[in-house]
């Protein structure tokens, strides 16, 4: 059975990382490329945002007894198989995991333009994940979840 409090806590962390990414990312990609501190802050918050999605996915899989996923990408596939998230979201988050791995492990360096694109357009994918998970949890619990707001987007808490 889904633990709504754990889900709400993980969604709150995801919201925080999305908000921090937006707050520290310059409007111009060249400014991000030229500012090492901003690049590191944006990269770090993106990494933690994607990690929050992974943590939430593995939590739901464990709570529902769907068997462990071998990889983060597989965890998102498992959620789609059980109707938690859409195929579109799976595809986007599989790409996000790749970015997370580059940032976390320094594979081939961090491309400031890739980080900028993720900060400007990829955050919508994380928000869609949160929305789809929230809706599924609400259906599973048979009740609506209390909402809060971050950057004008509807988010989940517990009632």
Image (cartoon, rainbow, N blue to C red):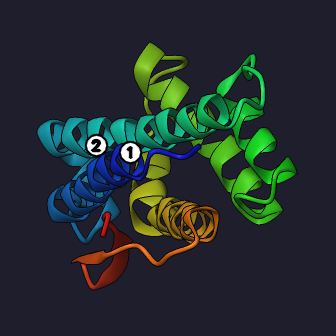
Check disc 2 and report its element: helix, strand or loop.
helix
- Residue lying at the far bottom in this picture: please name it: 152
Disc 1 target residue? 49
Near-viewer residue (117 or 54): 54
The quadrant the N terminus occupies is top right
Instruction: Please state if 7 lies on the left or on the right of 43 as rendered.
Output: right
Which image quarter: residue 67? top right
Residue under the point 46% across and 78% down? 144
Residue under the point 76% across and 53% down? 91
Instruction: Please state if 105 lies on the left or on the right of 40 as rendered.
Output: right
Label ID, residue 45: 2
Near-viewer residue (140 or 34): 140
Q: Are marks 2 and 1 in contact (CB under 8 Å)?
A: yes
Near-viewer residue (124 or 66): 66
Give the alpha-carbon distance from disc 2 to disc 1, as whole Å: 6 Å
- Location of residue 143 in the rendering, given as x and y in whole percent from the top left corner: 50, 75
Which image quarter: residue 16? bottom left
């Amino acid at each position: 059975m889904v633990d709504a409090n754990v889900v709400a806590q993980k969604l709150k962390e995801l919201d925080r990382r999305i908000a921090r990414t937006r707050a520290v990312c310059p409007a111009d990609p060249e400014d991000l490329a030229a500012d090492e501190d901003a690049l590191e802050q944006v990269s770090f918050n993106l990494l933690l945002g994607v990690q929050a999605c992974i943590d939430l996915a593995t939590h739901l899989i464990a709570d529902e007894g769907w068997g462990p996923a071998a990889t983060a990408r597989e965890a998102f596939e498992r959620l789609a198989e059980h109707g938690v998230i859409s195929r579109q979201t799976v595809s986007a988050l599989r790409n996000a995991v790749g970015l997370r791995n580059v940032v976390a492990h320094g594979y081939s360096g961090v491309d400031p333009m890739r980080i900028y694109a993720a900060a400007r357009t990829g955050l919508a994918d994380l928000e869609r994940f949160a929305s789809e998970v929230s809706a599924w949890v609400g259906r599973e619990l048979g009740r609506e979840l209390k909402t809060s707001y971050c950057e004008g987007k509807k988010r989940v808490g517990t009632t």
